[in-house]
Image (tube, helix red, strand yellow):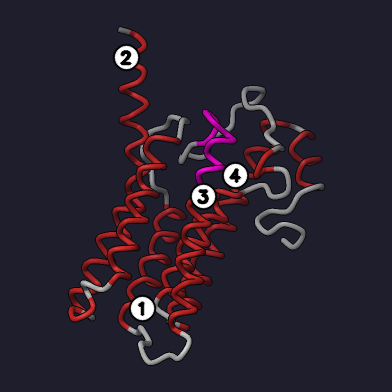
């Protein structure tokens, strides 16, 4: 009975994983109905919705870290950046762009790569991957292998790539710039809070890890 109860609790807390994919799905559907109803049944919409479903499923069933649903101001602005970029990319989609097919391919590659990277980050961290920032002194070991060997925040990089992919798929320069600025600023803000917690909970161990790794982009940043 105890095992089943714990399992149910974990499942309920992990339902927060469908929030962001669900919001983006709703925005995608609404955006096409409002701005591009004639394009609603194009392959782009169905492919994106399918990938959002895959992404949400991974967030719910792979993420093991518990925690109550708590979207702070940074989370909200991060999602707002993705939403704004998605709406702009739909409204300003450039169907006459000679290279739109190449942008579309690059965009879908980016979102698929982002989802895979997010999955690997969750699997590697296991029970220590959660949406709520928390770090108790002496209770969380340093994870410096797998996708965490060269960068410290692959999960955030994945979100950044996923949100950027929307604008690439629609060949929208303005959407791309808007999403990049919003996402980059608030991802870095959230990382600064998280790393402060990790430094305090792991003493010098995490500081040493920071010296030999990059924050988001291998060998660069």
Q: Is residue 6 positioned above or below 37 on the image?
A: above
Of discs 1 and 3, which sits in the foreground? 3
Side of 162 relative to 202 (left or right)? left
The kind of secondary structure element at disc 4 is helix
The answer to whether residue 123 is magenta is: yes
Count residues near mark 3 (Cα–Cα under 10 Å), then give few for <14, some for 14-19, many for 20+.
some
In this picture, residue 91 sits left or right of residue 114: left
Q: Which mark is residue 4?
A: 2
Relative to residue 17, is residue 187 depicted above or below?
below
Q: Earlier in the sequence, mark 2 or mark 4?
A: 2
The residue nearer to you, when weighing 102 against 84, is 102
Q: CA distance from mark 1 to mark 3?
A: 26 Å
Res. 116 mark: 3
Which of the two discs, 3 and 2, sits closer to the camera?
3
Pointer 2 with pointer 4, Cβ within 8 A: no
The residues tagged by marks 2 and 4 sit, at their Cα atoms, a distance apart of 32 Å
Of the numbered discs 3 and 2, the one sitting upstream in the chain is 2
Quarter of the image that includes the C terminus? bottom right
Question: Residue at left 32%, top 50%?
Answer: 53
**Residue at numbered disc 4:** 194
Q: CA distance from mark 2 to mark 1?
A: 45 Å
Q: What crowding class fits label 1: few (fewer than 14 Cα within 10 Å), some (14-19), or many (20 or more)?
A: many
Task: Give the alpha-carbon distance from disc 4 to disc 1, as whole Å.
Answer: 30 Å
Taking the spot 36% from the left edge, 11% from the top edge, the residue there is 3
The span shown in magenta is 118-129
Q: Position of residue 179 (x, y in %)?
A: 47, 71
Q: Name the N-terminal-most of marks 2 and 1.
A: 2
Q: Quadrant of the N terminus?
A: top left
Q: Which residue is mark 1?
A: 88
């Amino acid at each position: 009975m105890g095992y089943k109860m714990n399992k149910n609790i974990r499942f309920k807390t992990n339902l927060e994983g469908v929030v962001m994919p669900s919001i983006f799905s709703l925005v995608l559907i609404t955006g096409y109905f409002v701005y591009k109803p004639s394009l609603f049944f194009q392959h782009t919409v169905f492919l994106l919705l399918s990938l959002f479903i895959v992404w949400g499923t991974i967030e719910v069933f792979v993420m093991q870290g518990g925690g109550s649903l708590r979207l702070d101001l940074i989370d909200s602005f991060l999602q707002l950046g993705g939403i704004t970029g998605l709406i702009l990319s739909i409204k300003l989609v450039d169907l006459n762009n000679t290279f739109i097919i190449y942008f579309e391919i690059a965009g879908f590659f980016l979102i698929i790569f982002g989802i895979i990277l997010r999955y690997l980050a969750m699997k590697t961290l296991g029970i220590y991957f959660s949406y709520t920032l928390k770090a108790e002194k002496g209770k969380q070991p340093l994870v410096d292998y797998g996708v965490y060997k060269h960068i410290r925040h692959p999960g955030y990089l994945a979100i950044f790539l996923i949100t950027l992919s929307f604008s690439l798929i629609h060949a929208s320069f303005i959407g791309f710039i808007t999403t990049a600025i919003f996402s980059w600023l608030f991802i870095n803000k959230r990382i600064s809070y998280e790393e402060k917690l990790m430094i305090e909970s792991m003493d010098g161990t995490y500081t040493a890890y920071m010296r030999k790794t990059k924050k988001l982009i291998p060998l660069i940043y």
